Image: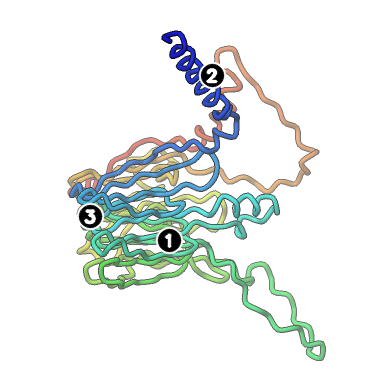
Amino acid sequence: MKKGYLLILFALFFFTQTYSQSAKKSPGHDLYDKWESLRAPAISDNGKYVSYEVQPGKGDGKLMILKTENNTTYIVPRGQKAVFADNSRFLACKVIPAAADTRKAKKDKLKEDKMPKDSLVIVSLEKNFQKKSFARVSDFYLPKENANFVAIQFEKDTTKEKTAPADSTKPEKKKESASKKKKKPEGTKLMYYFPETGDSAIFSDVTQVAISKKGTMSGFISQFGDSIDSVRITLFNPLTKKPFIRFSNPGYGKNIVFSEDGTKYAFLFSSDTIKEKTYALYYATDSIIKPYCIVDTQVVSLPMSWSPSENFNMYFSEDGEKLVFGVAPRPVIIPKDTLLEEEKVKLDIWSWNDKQIQPQQLKNLDQEKKRTYLSIFHTSTEK
């Protein structure tokens, strides 16, 4: 009798094991694409909201926004790079194109301006996760403090104006010279968007935007002009929502930066039209209407033929008393080449007493060309 029970139990155990083994699927390489990983966790300042990305090995991911009080979850498909406002009232994140759309565009060998572009989604956390979307966004910026607005920079507008067919009865117009031809604008559209009120301010031809840490002031550089390139520096006050033009000259501007409290700012300006531009450093405060030059090639404290460098991200000290910037030798103007590429002779020379071997020298060549040396401007003494 006991042997009968044992045989029955053994048969049941053997059958269960055999069935479970036959039901299991053998793992394959396709499983790697389905494995999900958690990335970029973040928590709001008030601790009520948590965000994180869920990314598969292949395909479209998603951004999860969790409300900790009741475990309510809101999903942003393909959301990435989420940023909470410091007041915990809204969250901004990028939404990348669908993986299938990007793959198809690459297979079709579309040009860069025709490729699918990122979008921006702003989620109002205190309004039941209401969202506002913006298409074709290249980047967005929030102040670290007092973040009641989002600065949104868009991609270039690729829509072309439709032109009427040429009239054969009219005489053919002479072709414009290269100097008179209208140049394509370098900048793009910039929008200051206020999520709580829905207000916005829009500006065009913007190449760079900066925001003070405390969110009290913002500014941007606009590059415009048909035959002559010109630059404009505009300040934008988020409290009054009004712009103020502070600088406008023929030339080029770069690297605008603010002090933490937004009362001081600086930028680089060059009036050169050639590729190898020499920049001067301009500075101003909120009490000065027009910025003025503080460092150029004529400053006696710099070595001869040195100037402020565009390859250093300058910044103000925490108290705003020091402006840290980079200097370097002026760019060398390369004369116009009269030789064809196949007529040029190239030779790499290395010496045994060089501090770096030749492959390392070649690898670091671009870095060496952009080498800068730290300099400090004291805002109180202006030295």
Instruction: Name, please, the residue furthest toward the front.
Output: 1
**Residue occupying image coordinates x 39% and y 41%:** 327
Quarter of the picture containing the C terminus is: top left
For marks 2 and 3 on the same chain, the one whose residue lies earlier in the sequence? 3
Q: Secondary structure at mark 3?
A: loop
Instruction: Classify residue 257 as left or right of residue 4.
Output: left
User: Which badge, 2 or 1, comes first in the chain's sequence?
Assistant: 1
Residue located beneath label 1 in the image: 153
* Kind of residue sitting beneath label 2: Gln
Q: Amino acid at mark 1?
A: Gln
Q: Position of residue 267 (x, y in %)?
A: 36, 54
- Residue annotated with mark 3: 88
Point out the tag, 1 or 3, that comes first from the N-terminus.
Answer: 3
- Judged from the image, the secondary structure of the residue bearing numbered disc 2 is loop
Q: Mark 2–mark 1 contact, CB under 8 Å?
A: no
Q: Secondary structure at mark 1?
A: strand
Q: Can you give x and y, in whole percent of width and height, for residue 322 in the image?
A: 23, 44
Q: Nearer the viewer, mark 2 or mark 3?
A: 3
Q: Nearer the viewer, mark 2 or mark 1?
A: 1
Which label sits on residue 356? 2
**Residue depicted at 23% across the width and 48% down the height:** 68
The relative height of residue 375 versus residue 76 in the rendered view (above or below) is above
Question: Is 100 situated left or right of 237 in this image?
Answer: right
Splitting the image into 4 quarters, where does residue 318 fall?
Answer: top left
Asked whether 336 or 88 is in front, the reply is: 88
Question: How many marks can you see?
Answer: 3
Q: Residues within 10 Å of mark 3 (few under 14, many from 20)?
A: some
For the residue marked with disc 3, what is the amino acid?
Ser
